Amino acid sequence: MTVIAPIEGENPFASHVGIDPTIYGGLYADDDLTIDESVTVDRYNGTVGWVSGNVTEDLLVANGELELASDANITGVPVVDGHFSGKDGAETSNIAFATDPAGTRIDEINGTEVYNVTDSTPPELFGAKLSESFDGIDDIDQQTERAIRLIDEYEDSNPIASEKLESESDKNVDGFYYEDSDIDGDDIDEFDTSNGDIHVAVDGNVELDGVDVTGDGRAYLYVSGDIDTDGVTVDGDQAQNFWIYGSSDADVTVRNVFQGVMYTPESNSLTVAKDTAVYGSIVAGEGIDIGENVSIHFDETLRTDVPIPEENRDVTIEIGERRSPLDVTFVLDRSGSMRDNDPSEQRVDATKNFIGLMQGEDSSVLEGDQSDQAGVYEFNQNGYERHHLSSDLSSVNSSVETSASGGTGIYSGIEIALDEYERNRSSSAEQHMILLSDGQNDPATEWVCTDGGWLGCDNWEFYDYNQQTLDQAERAADMNVTIHTIGLSDDADSDMLGDIANETDGDYYPAEDDDELEEIFEGIADKVTASSPTTFEVASVDEPTASPHDYAVNVREHPVNIGG
């Protein structure tokens, strides 16, 4: 007969449980998956820990259909063993790979068929057809059950070598532990692996809330029930040092931060809450719900296999000239001196020509189903709106007219345009302001009566309009509005206009007379409306640095002769 040998002597526990993990990338779903939010899957090298900026896109893998809703935005590389589709407006930062991409076949690149998934013009979502399916990941129910049983038996036979978990918030765990009831969020706050690996078997549900994994060893949890984590961190972002193994009956929830590997293939459900950051990998089954703004930073040292066949990895797609949409406001001086410095109203033609170079909703140049927006404003001592920020470029163009009276208050023109950005700016557009002035703040400072009448003033306030102008420039910088300034005539405050441009990463353009305005406006338009080819290519996916056996927890069955 054959029996399982006891865990003792030189035969470590790691050789007694039959889990041979397969890790493809940051997220694996063993079911149909719908994404309707922004999700990021990138990678880092776990041997050095997470370094912001030292990352590249990685794999989101679905063993079933993957559908992207209109608001979906995936930064990463989807890989789908099934049908891949997307609604208008859905975006991916890279080519998606699928055995059955939707849409129309548009090309074959190095032997790989490429599809326009949404049949949009130009293509917004690309699918490359996989030449073969990848292997799905099986459940580990038997292995998890075996691990729990072995640890229970080991604890019973080695009362000195192990202790049961205690409900103490400061309990440090090391060794082998068995718990036959649920673990609540305040039961454990640290797994200390300084003295070696930790194996914890829980025949029930597990909640981990604010748990740190410390030391150089690894901690393993084997859980028969549901799993809920809310803040789990590992020293040095070493995700390979913390593993949670769960069954196909598990409902899994991940919140806040999770560092480690959540290995629950074919689990009943997985919820990753809004704004959660994962460092490591998640392998899950059905009922997956990914919240908004989830980021999964895959530790590439965990990868055991690549689901994209080698013959499909050499795909690069370049489409036509594209750029982000623009929100451009024109803030034009209407002080009395403009009658002399722009007598032929060149600023009107220059502004209209600029607007004529902007793009409407039907443009193939803009990224996404969007439009440029423009708005027109004037100022003397006060600010005036000619036309609010709008995608109706024809209406905006018709609103451009001139008048000239009063003094100069540059701050007032900037302020009214920035107020409009706060109301109507597009979240995906670049914001630019074209500021034209022929003078200086006049007056630069003054005392203003704020409470009183003809016979006397009860309260005077001092106003520094130059400082107010600089304050508005700082406000623009905080709002990511770039101001390009134009100084018309020698009377323009070139120092002030230069400071405004520098503060907002714009440029200052001096103009000796109004004949130069059209050329200057056109030059700014060429700069801000410049587009470039958009290239989609496969993010480099290195060959695995690990094999399943590097993270295996194996079963070893020993034949034992009984009798003669």
Image (spheres, rainbow, N blue to C red):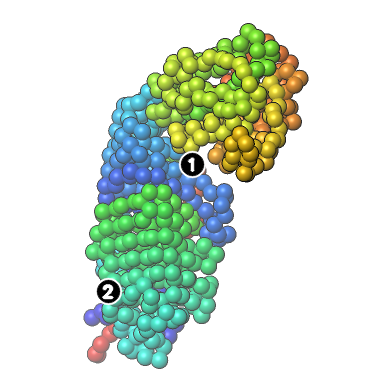
- The answer to which quarter of the image holds residue 93 is top left
Q: Residue at x 52, y 22 (%)?
A: 376
Disc 1, SS = loop
Of labels 2 and 1, the one closer to you? 2
Q: Residue at x 47, y 19 (%)?
A: 396
Q: Is residue 363 visible?
A: no
Q: Is residue 441 above or below residue 169?
A: above
Look at the numbered discs 2 and 1 and tell me whether their residues touch, using CB distance below 8 Å. no
Q: Quadrant of the C terminus?
A: bottom left
| Picture coordinates of residue 548, whole percent (x, y) | 41, 61
Closer to us: 75 or 489: 489
Q: Quadrant of the N terminus?
A: bottom left
Q: CA distance from mark 2 to mark 1?
A: 41 Å
Q: Is residue 209 visible?
A: yes
Closer to us: 112 or 413: 413
The residue that disc 2 covers is 204
The amino acid type found where label 1 is placed reads: Ala
Q: Residue at x 28, y 85 (%)?
A: 561
Q: Is residue 377 above or below residue 482?
A: above
Disc 2, SS = loop
The residue that disc 1 covers is 539
Which mark is drawn over residue 70?
A: none
Q: Earlier in the sequence, mark 2 or mark 1?
A: 2
| Picture coordinates of residue 324, whole percent (x, y) | 49, 30
Q: Is residue 152 above or below residue 316?
A: below
Would residue 274 be found to the left or right of residue 465 on screen? left
Count of marks placed on residues: 2
The amino acid type found where label 2 is placed reads: Gly
Q: Is residue 437 above or below residue 262?
A: above
